[in-house]
Amino acid sequence: MINSTAANSGAPPVREVTETVVDAARYSTVPSLMDSLLHDVRNPLNAMSIHLEVLTEKLKVDGQVPPSQEKNLKSMREQIQRVDGILRRFAEFIVSRPGGAGEADLSETVTRAMEVLAHESRKRRLQVRPTLAPGVRARLADIGELGFLVVQALTRAYGRSETGHEVSVVVRSEDAKAVFEVVDANVAGVVGGSEASAALELRCAQLGVELHLLAGTCRLSFPLA
């Protein structure tokens, strides 16, 4: 009876509504989980850094660490810093932290987003070709959403692209606008990226960002800062 009423009224099917509610609830836990991950991983990293410095002091002979050990210690420091950096980047793009109107470096944001999604592009064996003009700054009504928009555009392109093909990523200034453009390789009508497209359309409409989805091209235009 419920399904019939929903169908006759033009409302979404009950299953679709249910899945939407479940997905929203699942995502609502992400900020807490990410904060916990940052805390639970970075604490051991800090402890490892402290122990590494203690070990460095103990290994010193006549005030110097033997060359044979210095290389290993340097490598360990670099790996600790790398893990900490990865956590920071993922937290930036996963956790929604709304901000006010402002400006940000679009070129830098796109670069960081591609690093976060590097595993996805490698898994699909995509050839990502970035052409990013340096220092292109964009204005946005909620600057905290810039990372979300960039990740959704890249995710859409990766999901639509056929394995082994090229995805072009461009940042440029054009007619007083900061333009972010992604051209995918959907040469065989690969199905994918629909959720990202819907998210882009909704959020861009809310924020007043110009969005153009034309064939294999996704282009976002922001006021140039």
Image (cartoon, rainbow, N blue to C red):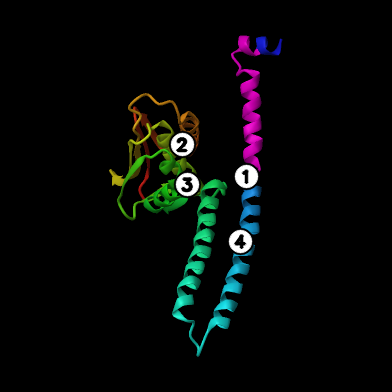
Residue 59 drawn at (x, y percent): 55, 81
Residue ID for mark 3: 147
**Residue 122 appears in which quarter of the rendering?**
top left
Residue ID for mark 1: 30
Residue 214 vertical position relative to residue 93 in the rendered view, above or below:
above
Of callouts 1 and 3, which one flags the residue occurring earlier in the amino acid sequence?
A: 1
Label 1 CA crowd tier, 10 Å (few <14, some 14–19, many 20+): some
Of callouts 2 and 4, which one flags the residue occurring earlier in the amino acid sequence?
A: 4
Q: What is the secondary structure assignment of the residue under circle 2?
A: helix
Of callouts 3 and 4, which one flags the residue occurring earlier in the amino acid sequence?
A: 4
**Residue 14 appears in which quarter of the rendering?**
top right
**Disc marking residue 204:** 2
Of callouts 4 and 1, which one flags the residue occurring earlier in the amino acid sequence?
A: 1
Give me the C-alpha separation between circle 4 and circle 1.
Answer: 18 Å
Give me the C-alpha separation between circle 2 and circle 4.
Answer: 34 Å
Horizontal placement of 172 versus 145: left or right? left
Residue ID for mark 4: 42
Of callouts 2 and 3, which one flags the residue occurring earlier in the amino acid sequence?
A: 3
What is the magenta range?
6-30
Say which residue appears at 54% left-offset and 55% top-offset: 87
Residue 189 within the segment the image draws in magenta = no
Label 2 CA crowd tier, 10 Å (few <14, some 14–19, many 20+): some
